[in-house]
Image: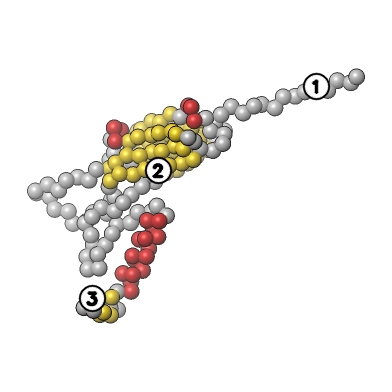
C-alpha cells in the first residue's frame, strides 16, 4: 500500500479520496458508513430514507422506504406549501451475548421536505403506512375547466 509518514502519522491518499467521497455523499443526501484510517467504524451513519415521487392525472404520490420503523415514530406535516416527513429508526442496543462485527445500516432521526407543486391540493393530503413503506397521497386541485363560449352574430 502506498503510504507516506508525516509527523508520525501515516498518510494514505486513498483514505483522503474516501473522505472526500463521504463529504460529497453527505452534501447530496446519500449517506455512507464512516471509517477510521485503520479500521471500519462501528458508529451508524446518518441517513435519509429513499423516496420515489410519482405523478398521474389525479395526484402526486410520494413513496418513502422506512424499514424497521414503527408507525408511531413517523410524522407527516403540511405547512406553508411544504410537506415534511420525519421520524426515527432506533439502533438496537448491544446485548451481552451479541457482538456486532459490522454496522452498515443507518439509524437515527431523519427529516425529508418537499415543496408542493402549484397544482397540489394541500388540504386533502393523505398518508398510509404499510410493509415499511410510507405512501403520501397529494391530490391535484381541480382546475377551472375551459368553457366553450358561443359567439352570436348581431
User: What label sits on residue 112 in the rendered view?
Assistant: 2
Between discs 2 and 1, the one toward the N terminus: 2
Residue 97 place in picture, x, y as percent = 9, 49
Label 1, residues with CA under 10 Å away: few <14, some 14-19, many ≥20: few
* Distance of label 2 from label 1 (alpha carbons): 49 Å
User: What quarter of the picture does the N terminus occupy?
Assistant: bottom left
Q: Which residue is mark 3?
A: 9
Q: Which residue is mark 1?
A: 150
Q: Nearer the viewer, residue 5 or 145?
A: 5
Quarter of the rendering containing residue 10: bottom left
Please name the residue shown 37% across and 65% down the image: 20
Residue 22 place in picture, x, y as percent = 35, 61
Label count reads 3
* Distance of label 2 from label 3 (alpha carbons): 39 Å
Residue 92 shows in the view: yes
Tell me how the rendering is colored: secondary structure
Amino acid at each position: 500500500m502506498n503510504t507516506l509518514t508525516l509527523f508520525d502519522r501515516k498518510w494514505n491518499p486513498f483514505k483522503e479520496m474516501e473522505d472526500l467521497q463521504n463529504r460529497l455523499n453527505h452534501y447530496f443526501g446519500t449517506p455512507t458508513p464512516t471509517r477510521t484510517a485503520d479500521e471500519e467504524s462501528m458508529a451508524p451513519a446518518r441517513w435519509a430514507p429513499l423516496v420515489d415521487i410519482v405523478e398521474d392525472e389525479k395526484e402526486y404520490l410520494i413513496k418513502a422506504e422506512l424499514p424497521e420503523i414503527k408507525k408511531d415514530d413517523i410524522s407527516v406535516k403540511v405547512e406553508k406549501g411544504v410537506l415534511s416527513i420525519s421520524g426515527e429508526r432506533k439502533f438496537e442496543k448491544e446485548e451481552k451475548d451479541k457482538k456486532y462485527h459490522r454496522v452498515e445500516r443507518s439509524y437515527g432521526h431523519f427529516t425529508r421536505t418537499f415543496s408542493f407543486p402549484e397544482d397540489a391540493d394541500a388540504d386533502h393530503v393523505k398518508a398510509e403506512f404499510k410493509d415499511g413503506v410510507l405512501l403520501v397521497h397529494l391530490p391535484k386541485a381541480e382546475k377551472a375547466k375551459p368553457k366553450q363560449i358561443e359567439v352570436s352574430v348581431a
